[in-house]
Amino acid sequence: MERTLDIPKEDLDAVKKRLSRAQGQLGGIIKMVEEGRDCAEILTQLAAAQAAVSKAAFSLIASGIANCGTDANGLADRAKLEKAFLSLS
């Protein structure tokens, strides 16, 4: 059975802030593409958005590691942990 997030509110707020920033960056990137801006500029912004999403994901996993990486009995589940981390690569 899937488990729900059990992460402190301040940690979730930080993740949401990062994701909101990435959302804004993506809107800017779409506008840059539509305007035909320089490819290098677009790629730089894409890398920044990708980094923001990755940091949010790592933060979420780090904060919720006990929840994301345990089985129904609360015991560490190495396979679940590996799967969660590998999903970020």
Image: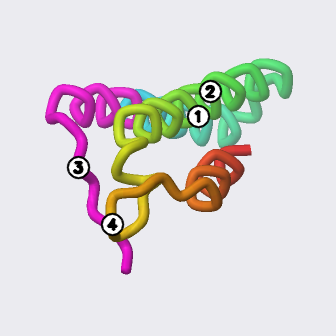
Find the distance from the CA under tag 1 to the CA under tag 2: 5 Å
Question: Which marked residue is nearer to the observer: mark 1 or mark 3?
Answer: 3
Indicate which disc residue 51 carries.
Answer: 2
> Would you say residue 80 sits in the magenta stretch?
no
Q: Which residue is mark 1?
A: 54
In the picture provided, is 1 more to the left or to the right than 50? left
**Labels 1 & 2 near each other (Cβ < 8 A):** yes
Secondary structure state at the residue bearing disc 4: loop
Question: Which marked residue is nearer to the observer: mark 2 or mark 3?
Answer: 3
Indicate which disc residue 6 carries.
Answer: 3
Find the distance from the CA under tag 2 to the CA under tag 3: 24 Å
Decide which of tag 1 and tag 3 comes sooner along the chain: 3
- Position in image of residue 89 (x %, y %): 74, 44
Secondary structure state at the residue bearing disc 1: helix
Q: Nearer the viewer, residue 19 or 73?
A: 73
Find the distance from the CA under tag 4 to the CA under tag 2: 34 Å
- In this view, 10 is above or below 69: above
Q: Nearer the viewer, residue 9 or 40?
A: 9
Residue type at mark 3 is: Asp
Range shown magenta: 1-19
Crowding at dot 1, Cα within 10 Å, few <14 / some 14-19 / many 20+, comes out as some
Decide which of tag 4 and tag 1 comes sooner along the chain: 1
- What's the residue at 36%, 33% (across, down)? 63
